[in-house]
Image (cartoon, rainbow, N blue to C red):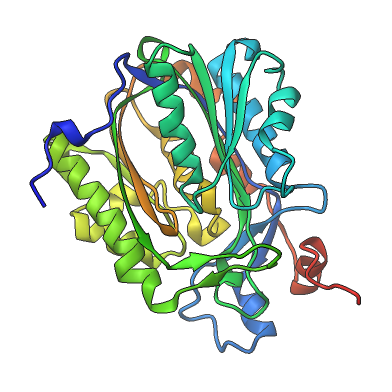
Amino acid sequence: MTEPTDSILLKPRIPVGIIGYGVYIPRYRLPAAEVARIWKAGDDEGLPIKEKAVPGMDEDTISISIEASRNALKRAGIDPAGIRAVWVGSESHPYAVKPSSTIVAEAIGCSPHIQAGDWEFACKAGTEAMVAAIGLVGSGMAHYALAIGADTAQGRPGDALEYTAAAGGAAYILGPAEESLAIINATFSYVSDTPDFWRRPKQSYPEHGQRFTGDPAYFKHISEAGKHMMQAAGTTPADYQYAVFHQPNTKFPQRVAAMLGFSKEQIKTGLLSPVIGNTYAGAAIVGLTAILDEAKPGDRVLMVSFGSGAGSDAFDITITDKILERCDKALKTQDYIARRTEVDYATYTRLRGKLTMR
Protein backbone atom coordinates (compact mmCIF):
# COMPACT_ATOMS: atom_id res chain seq x y z
CA MET A 1 0.00 0.00 0.00
CA THR A 2 1.32 3.43 -0.88
CA GLU A 3 1.82 5.98 1.87
CA PRO A 4 -1.31 8.08 2.42
CA THR A 5 -1.27 11.65 1.20
CA ASP A 6 -3.59 14.60 1.63
CA SER A 7 -5.49 13.43 -1.47
CA ILE A 8 -7.04 10.47 0.41
CA LEU A 9 -8.81 12.79 2.85
CA LEU A 10 -12.44 13.68 2.23
CA LYS A 11 -12.65 17.47 2.14
CA PRO A 12 -15.69 19.46 0.94
CA ARG A 13 -15.22 22.24 -1.61
CA ILE A 14 -17.01 24.60 0.76
CA PRO A 15 -15.66 24.46 4.36
CA VAL A 16 -18.18 22.80 6.68
CA GLY A 17 -18.62 22.58 10.43
CA ILE A 18 -20.98 21.76 13.27
CA ILE A 19 -23.64 24.44 13.76
CA GLY A 20 -25.36 22.72 16.68
CA TYR A 21 -25.20 19.42 18.51
CA GLY A 22 -27.44 17.57 20.92
CA VAL A 23 -27.56 14.38 22.91
CA TYR A 24 -30.16 12.24 24.62
CA ILE A 25 -29.54 9.38 27.06
CA PRO A 26 -32.46 7.50 28.65
CA ARG A 27 -32.89 7.72 32.42
CA TYR A 28 -32.93 4.03 33.33
CA ARG A 29 -29.65 2.25 34.25
CA LEU A 30 -28.95 -1.46 34.56
CA PRO A 31 -25.81 -2.24 36.61
CA ALA A 32 -23.47 -4.79 35.04
CA ALA A 33 -23.33 -6.48 38.44
CA GLU A 34 -27.07 -7.17 38.11
CA VAL A 35 -26.52 -9.01 34.81
CA ALA A 36 -23.68 -10.97 36.40
CA ARG A 37 -25.92 -11.86 39.38
CA ILE A 38 -28.57 -13.39 37.15
CA TRP A 39 -26.19 -15.29 34.91
CA LYS A 40 -23.77 -16.36 37.67
CA ALA A 41 -20.79 -14.59 36.11
CA GLY A 42 -18.85 -14.38 39.35
CA ASP A 43 -17.79 -11.23 41.18
CA ASP A 44 -17.75 -7.69 39.83
CA GLU A 45 -14.09 -7.76 38.87
CA GLY A 46 -13.53 -7.68 35.13
CA LEU A 47 -17.05 -6.63 34.15
CA PRO A 48 -16.94 -4.67 30.86
CA ILE A 49 -18.83 -1.62 32.20
CA LYS A 50 -20.35 -0.32 35.46
CA GLU A 51 -23.87 0.12 34.09
CA LYS A 52 -25.75 0.81 30.87
CA ALA A 53 -28.58 3.09 29.76
CA VAL A 54 -31.88 1.32 29.09
CA PRO A 55 -34.77 2.88 27.14
CA GLY A 56 -38.17 3.24 28.78
CA MET A 57 -41.23 1.47 27.42
CA ASP A 58 -42.17 4.56 25.39
CA GLU A 59 -38.66 5.19 24.02
CA ASP A 60 -37.08 3.98 20.79
CA THR A 61 -34.55 5.15 18.20
CA ILE A 62 -37.05 7.69 16.84
CA SER A 63 -37.85 9.32 20.18
CA ILE A 64 -34.16 9.41 21.10
CA SER A 65 -33.37 11.03 17.73
CA ILE A 66 -36.09 13.66 18.21
CA GLU A 67 -34.86 14.68 21.65
CA ALA A 68 -31.22 14.87 20.53
CA SER A 69 -32.23 16.88 17.44
CA ARG A 70 -34.23 19.37 19.50
CA ASN A 71 -31.17 19.95 21.66
CA ALA A 72 -29.06 20.45 18.52
CA LEU A 73 -31.57 23.02 17.23
CA LYS A 74 -31.42 24.91 20.53
CA ARG A 75 -27.66 25.26 20.18
CA ALA A 76 -27.79 26.09 16.48
CA GLY A 77 -30.46 28.76 16.94
CA ILE A 78 -31.80 28.26 13.40
CA ASP A 79 -35.22 27.75 11.85
CA PRO A 80 -35.65 23.97 11.38
CA ALA A 81 -37.30 24.69 8.03
CA GLY A 82 -33.84 25.69 6.77
CA ILE A 83 -32.53 22.15 7.16
CA ARG A 84 -32.52 20.34 3.81
CA ALA A 85 -31.70 16.79 4.89
CA VAL A 86 -32.50 14.63 7.92
CA TRP A 87 -30.53 11.39 8.05
CA VAL A 88 -30.90 8.88 10.89
CA GLY A 89 -28.22 6.25 11.39
CA SER A 90 -29.12 3.23 13.51
CA GLU A 91 -29.09 -0.55 13.68
CA SER A 92 -32.33 -0.59 15.68
CA HIS A 93 -34.82 1.34 13.57
CA PRO A 94 -38.25 0.49 15.07
CA TYR A 95 -39.82 -0.33 11.67
CA ALA A 96 -38.57 -2.82 9.11
CA VAL A 97 -39.93 -0.72 6.24
CA LYS A 98 -41.35 2.61 7.49
CA PRO A 99 -38.49 5.15 7.79
CA SER A 100 -37.41 6.78 11.03
CA SER A 101 -36.18 9.94 9.32
CA THR A 102 -39.57 11.14 8.09
CA ILE A 103 -41.03 10.96 11.61
CA VAL A 104 -38.04 12.83 13.07
CA ALA A 105 -38.17 15.49 10.34
CA GLU A 106 -41.86 16.18 10.91
CA ALA A 107 -41.56 16.15 14.70
CA ILE A 108 -38.85 18.81 14.74
CA GLY A 109 -40.46 21.01 12.06
CA CYS A 110 -38.26 20.28 9.04
CA SER A 111 -40.84 18.82 6.66
CA PRO A 112 -42.13 18.81 3.98
CA HIS A 113 -39.36 20.48 1.94
CA ILE A 114 -36.75 18.01 3.06
CA GLN A 115 -34.60 15.11 1.90
CA ALA A 116 -34.83 12.26 4.40
CA GLY A 117 -33.32 8.82 4.72
CA ASP A 118 -32.30 6.07 7.13
CA TRP A 119 -28.72 4.84 7.30
CA GLU A 120 -27.28 1.50 8.38
CA PHE A 121 -23.67 0.57 8.96
CA ALA A 122 -23.80 -1.00 12.39
CA CYS A 123 -22.10 1.26 14.94
CA LYS A 124 -20.79 3.77 12.39
CA ALA A 125 -24.19 4.57 10.89
CA GLY A 126 -24.14 7.91 12.72
CA THR A 127 -20.75 9.00 11.39
CA GLU A 128 -21.69 7.69 7.94
CA ALA A 129 -24.66 10.09 8.01
CA MET A 130 -22.33 12.88 9.16
CA VAL A 131 -19.93 12.35 6.25
CA ALA A 132 -22.83 12.45 3.79
CA ALA A 133 -24.20 15.61 5.42
CA ILE A 134 -20.78 17.25 5.17
CA GLY A 135 -20.74 16.38 1.46
CA LEU A 136 -24.25 17.75 0.90
CA VAL A 137 -23.45 21.07 2.57
CA GLY A 138 -19.93 21.20 1.18
CA SER A 139 -21.20 20.81 -2.39
CA GLY A 140 -23.54 23.77 -2.00
CA MET A 141 -26.69 21.64 -2.41
CA ALA A 142 -27.85 22.49 1.12
CA HIS A 143 -27.13 25.20 3.67
CA TYR A 144 -27.86 22.91 6.64
CA ALA A 145 -28.15 19.12 7.04
CA LEU A 146 -28.95 17.06 10.12
CA ALA A 147 -27.11 13.80 10.88
CA ILE A 148 -28.16 11.53 13.74
CA GLY A 149 -26.80 8.36 15.32
CA ALA A 150 -29.12 6.59 17.78
CA ASP A 151 -29.78 3.08 19.00
CA THR A 152 -31.69 0.93 21.49
CA ALA A 153 -29.45 -2.07 21.04
CA GLN A 154 -30.11 -5.48 22.59
CA GLY A 155 -28.01 -8.45 23.54
CA ARG A 156 -29.22 -12.02 23.85
CA PRO A 157 -29.94 -12.92 27.50
CA GLY A 158 -26.76 -14.27 29.05
CA ASP A 159 -24.59 -13.16 26.11
CA ALA A 160 -21.59 -10.88 26.66
CA LEU A 161 -23.36 -8.18 24.64
CA GLU A 162 -26.11 -7.96 27.26
CA TYR A 163 -23.69 -6.21 29.62
CA THR A 164 -23.00 -3.40 27.16
CA ALA A 165 -25.81 -3.09 24.58
CA ALA A 166 -27.33 0.24 25.58
CA ALA A 167 -29.48 3.14 24.37
CA GLY A 168 -28.72 6.75 23.48
CA GLY A 169 -28.02 9.06 20.58
CA ALA A 170 -26.58 12.30 19.30
CA ALA A 171 -27.55 14.76 16.56
CA TYR A 172 -25.38 17.18 14.58
CA ILE A 173 -26.46 20.05 12.36
CA LEU A 174 -23.83 20.59 9.67
CA GLY A 175 -23.50 23.95 7.94
CA PRO A 176 -21.05 26.57 6.64
CA ALA A 177 -17.77 26.79 8.56
CA GLU A 178 -18.20 30.50 9.28
CA GLU A 179 -21.33 29.73 11.32
CA SER A 180 -19.85 26.72 13.11
CA LEU A 181 -18.91 26.03 16.70
CA ALA A 182 -16.51 23.36 15.40
CA ILE A 183 -14.99 23.08 11.93
CA ILE A 184 -14.58 19.68 10.25
CA ASN A 185 -11.09 19.96 8.75
CA ALA A 186 -11.31 16.59 6.99
CA THR A 187 -12.66 13.04 7.23
CA PHE A 188 -11.21 9.71 6.21
CA SER A 189 -12.81 6.25 5.95
CA TYR A 190 -11.22 2.81 6.13
CA VAL A 191 -13.50 -0.10 5.18
CA SER A 192 -13.22 -3.84 4.56
CA ASP A 193 -15.48 -6.90 4.55
CA THR A 194 -14.71 -8.32 7.98
CA PRO A 195 -17.47 -10.58 9.38
CA ASP A 196 -17.36 -9.71 13.07
CA PHE A 197 -21.01 -8.96 13.87
CA TRP A 198 -24.37 -9.42 12.16
CA ARG A 199 -28.11 -9.98 12.58
CA ARG A 200 -30.15 -11.75 9.93
CA PRO A 201 -33.79 -10.86 9.09
CA LYS A 202 -36.32 -11.86 11.76
CA GLN A 203 -33.60 -12.54 14.32
CA SER A 204 -34.15 -10.72 17.63
CA TYR A 205 -30.50 -10.61 18.64
CA PRO A 206 -27.20 -10.12 16.82
CA GLU A 207 -24.41 -12.66 16.53
CA HIS A 208 -20.76 -11.81 16.97
CA GLY A 209 -17.78 -13.40 15.29
CA GLN A 210 -15.80 -14.00 18.50
CA ARG A 211 -12.16 -13.98 17.36
CA PHE A 212 -12.91 -11.52 14.52
CA THR A 213 -14.25 -8.87 16.89
CA GLY A 214 -10.96 -7.59 18.30
CA ASP A 215 -7.74 -7.48 16.28
CA PRO A 216 -8.96 -7.96 12.67
CA ALA A 217 -12.06 -5.79 13.15
CA TYR A 218 -12.09 -3.10 15.86
CA PHE A 219 -8.37 -2.51 16.40
CA LYS A 220 -7.34 -2.89 12.75
CA HIS A 221 -9.90 -0.45 11.37
CA ILE A 222 -9.75 2.24 14.04
CA SER A 223 -5.96 2.25 14.17
CA GLU A 224 -5.64 2.37 10.36
CA ALA A 225 -8.24 5.14 10.02
CA GLY A 226 -6.64 7.19 12.78
CA LYS A 227 -3.11 6.62 11.52
CA HIS A 228 -3.94 7.50 7.90
CA MET A 229 -5.85 10.58 8.99
CA MET A 230 -2.92 11.93 10.99
CA GLN A 231 -0.35 11.06 8.34
CA ALA A 232 -2.34 12.74 5.59
CA ALA A 233 -3.18 15.77 7.76
CA GLY A 234 0.42 16.10 8.93
CA THR A 235 -0.55 15.82 12.60
CA THR A 236 0.51 13.77 15.63
CA PRO A 237 -1.39 12.89 18.83
CA ALA A 238 0.27 15.89 20.48
CA ASP A 239 -1.69 18.21 18.16
CA TYR A 240 -5.01 17.11 19.69
CA GLN A 241 -6.42 18.08 23.05
CA TYR A 242 -9.08 15.36 22.83
CA ALA A 243 -9.65 12.03 21.13
CA VAL A 244 -12.73 9.81 21.09
CA PHE A 245 -13.07 6.30 19.70
CA HIS A 246 -15.93 3.84 19.35
CA GLN A 247 -16.44 2.32 22.77
CA PRO A 248 -18.06 -1.13 22.89
CA ASN A 249 -16.58 -1.53 26.37
CA THR A 250 -14.04 0.22 28.59
CA LYS A 251 -10.84 -1.61 27.58
CA PHE A 252 -11.01 -1.44 23.76
CA PRO A 253 -10.91 2.38 23.36
CA GLN A 254 -8.12 2.67 25.92
CA ARG A 255 -6.03 0.06 24.11
CA VAL A 256 -6.53 1.57 20.64
CA ALA A 257 -5.76 5.05 22.03
CA ALA A 258 -2.43 3.76 23.33
CA MET A 259 -1.74 2.08 19.97
CA LEU A 260 -2.15 5.45 18.24
CA GLY A 261 -0.12 7.36 20.84
CA PHE A 262 -2.90 9.09 22.80
CA SER A 263 -2.85 9.42 26.57
CA LYS A 264 -5.60 8.45 29.01
CA GLU A 265 -6.07 12.13 29.75
CA GLN A 266 -6.85 12.89 26.08
CA ILE A 267 -9.61 10.26 25.91
CA LYS A 268 -11.03 10.65 29.43
CA THR A 269 -13.77 13.18 28.61
CA GLY A 270 -15.28 11.24 25.71
CA LEU A 271 -15.03 7.79 27.32
CA LEU A 272 -18.62 7.27 28.46
CA SER A 273 -19.05 3.50 28.05
CA PRO A 274 -18.40 2.72 31.75
CA VAL A 275 -21.53 4.60 32.82
CA ILE A 276 -23.93 4.38 29.84
CA GLY A 277 -22.70 1.31 27.93
CA ASN A 278 -22.31 0.95 24.18
CA THR A 279 -24.85 3.18 22.40
CA TYR A 280 -23.85 1.59 19.07
CA ALA A 281 -24.57 4.09 16.25
CA GLY A 282 -24.28 6.84 18.85
CA ALA A 283 -21.18 5.59 20.68
CA ALA A 284 -18.43 7.78 19.18
CA ILE A 285 -20.65 10.78 18.48
CA VAL A 286 -22.22 10.75 21.95
CA GLY A 287 -18.66 10.79 23.28
CA LEU A 288 -17.97 13.80 21.07
CA THR A 289 -20.88 15.71 22.64
CA ALA A 290 -19.22 15.35 26.05
CA ILE A 291 -16.04 16.82 24.59
CA LEU A 292 -17.86 19.72 22.94
CA ASP A 293 -19.51 20.45 26.30
CA GLU A 294 -16.13 21.37 27.79
CA ALA A 295 -13.82 22.18 24.84
CA LYS A 296 -12.31 25.63 24.39
CA PRO A 297 -11.79 27.67 21.19
CA GLY A 298 -8.76 26.40 19.29
CA ASP A 299 -8.90 22.89 20.76
CA ARG A 300 -8.51 20.07 18.26
CA VAL A 301 -10.32 16.72 18.36
CA LEU A 302 -9.75 13.39 16.63
CA MET A 303 -12.85 11.19 16.46
CA VAL A 304 -12.80 7.67 15.00
CA SER A 305 -15.91 5.51 14.83
CA PHE A 306 -16.20 1.80 14.10
CA GLY A 307 -18.95 -0.24 12.50
CA SER A 308 -19.07 -4.00 12.47
CA GLY A 309 -18.88 -5.29 8.99
CA ALA A 310 -16.30 -3.50 9.15
CA GLY A 311 -15.26 0.10 8.78
CA SER A 312 -14.15 3.29 10.50
CA ASP A 313 -14.67 7.00 9.87
CA ALA A 314 -12.07 9.44 11.20
CA PHE A 315 -12.72 13.16 11.74
CA ASP A 316 -10.27 16.00 12.35
CA ILE A 317 -12.15 18.80 14.16
CA THR A 318 -11.18 22.28 15.39
CA ILE A 319 -13.30 24.13 17.97
CA THR A 320 -14.20 27.78 17.27
CA ASP A 321 -15.09 30.65 19.60
CA LYS A 322 -18.81 30.14 18.85
CA ILE A 323 -18.74 27.19 21.28
CA LEU A 324 -18.75 29.70 24.13
CA GLU A 325 -22.11 31.21 23.23
CA ARG A 326 -23.93 27.99 22.26
CA CYS A 327 -22.76 25.23 24.58
CA ASP A 328 -25.08 26.13 27.47
CA LYS A 329 -28.25 26.50 25.37
CA ALA A 330 -29.28 22.85 25.88
CA LEU A 331 -28.81 20.04 28.39
CA LYS A 332 -25.26 18.69 28.46
CA THR A 333 -24.18 15.07 28.28
CA GLN A 334 -23.27 14.93 31.95
CA ASP A 335 -26.74 16.25 32.82
CA TYR A 336 -28.25 13.18 31.20
CA ILE A 337 -25.71 10.85 32.80
CA ALA A 338 -26.46 12.29 36.26
CA ARG A 339 -30.23 11.92 35.71
CA ARG A 340 -30.46 8.19 36.42
CA THR A 341 -32.88 5.66 37.86
CA GLU A 342 -31.43 2.23 38.63
CA VAL A 343 -33.45 -0.84 37.62
CA ASP A 344 -33.09 -4.53 38.42
CA TYR A 345 -32.91 -7.32 35.86
CA ALA A 346 -36.63 -8.09 36.08
CA THR A 347 -37.57 -4.48 35.28
CA TYR A 348 -35.02 -4.43 32.48
CA THR A 349 -36.57 -7.61 31.03
CA ARG A 350 -40.00 -5.97 31.03
CA LEU A 351 -38.76 -2.68 29.56
CA ARG A 352 -36.97 -4.44 26.70
CA GLY A 353 -39.68 -6.99 25.98
CA LYS A 354 -37.36 -9.93 26.54
CA LEU A 355 -40.04 -12.11 28.11
CA THR A 356 -42.54 -13.38 25.54
CA MET A 357 -45.58 -15.63 25.87
CA ARG A 358 -46.25 -18.38 23.33
Residue that extends furthest to the left in the rendered view of this protein: 3
Residue 290 visible (yes or no):
no
Residue 150 lies left or right of residue 11; in this view the side is right
Give the total number of marks visible in the rendering. 0
**Vertical arrangement, residue 135 with respect to residue 283, above or below:** above
The vertical placement of 341 against 318, above or below, is: below
Task: Point out residue 216 in the picture as x, y percentages from the top left corner.
Answer: 30, 68
Please name whichever residue, 44 or 215, is drawn nearer the observer in this view of the structure: 215
Could you tell me residue 9's position as x and y percent?
Answer: 23, 33
The residue under the point 23% across, 38% down is: 240
Question: How far across and down, in percent of the image, does residue 313 sit?
Answer: 35, 44
- Find residue 159 and report its image quarter: bottom right
- Give the residue drawn at x 69%, y 38%: 100
- Describe residue 200's horizontal placement relative to residue 316 as left or right: right
The percent coordinates of residue 133 (x first, y second) are: 46, 26
> Which residue sits at x=29%, y=51%?
265
* Residue drawn at (53%, 58%) of the image: 278
Looking at this view, is 2 or 54 the one in front? 2
